[in-house]
Image (tube, rainbow, N blue to C red):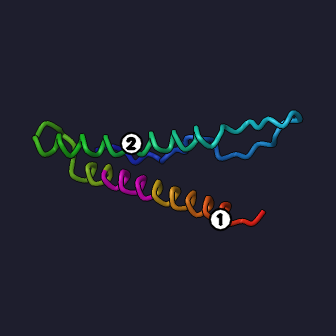
Amino acid sequence: MTTISSITLPISASTSTPSATGDSAEPPFSSVFSSMLNGMSQYQDHAAQQVRDVELGQSEVGINDLMVSIQKATVSLQLGVQVRNKMIAAYNEVMNMSV
């Protein structure tokens, strides 16, 4: 049986202050979003591979580990959908602002 590991964020949660030149030490949003999408894809692929292996009897993965993998994939997808919804809402709000 495998141990439960924590889900790590792709970017450090600490906030940094911009330097005097105006450059920020934080990565751009596009790279953060891209890494989030890649993480979602990896969770989905891992869960799908485990399901295939269990169905074919090729794996020693327990049902509990399989269910955890499926839940991780589901939660990551739900997070992605919520981030997308917030981005669309923010875009619509900006577009509706009067100049």
> Would residue 18 be found to the left or right of residue 77 on screen?
right
> Considering depth in this image, is 57 or 81 the residue closer to the camera?
81
Q: Which mark is residue 41?
A: 2
- Looking at the image, which residue is at 45% across and 58% down? 81
Q: Position of residue 61 (x, y in %)?
A: 22, 43
Q: Position of residue 58 (x, y in %)?
A: 13, 36
Q: Which residues are magenta?
A: 70-78
- State which mark lies toward you, 1 or 2: 1
Question: How far apart are the two marked residues, 1 and 2, measured between alpha carbons?
Answer: 29 Å
Image quadrant assignment for residue 60: top left
- Looking at the image, which residue is at 48% across and 47% down? 7
Label 1: which residue? 93
Q: Look at label 1 and name its amino acid.
A: Glu
Q: Position of residue 68 (x, y in %)?
A: 32, 53
**Residue 30 vertical position relative to residue 82 in the rendered view, above or below:** above
Q: Secondary structure at mark 2?
A: helix
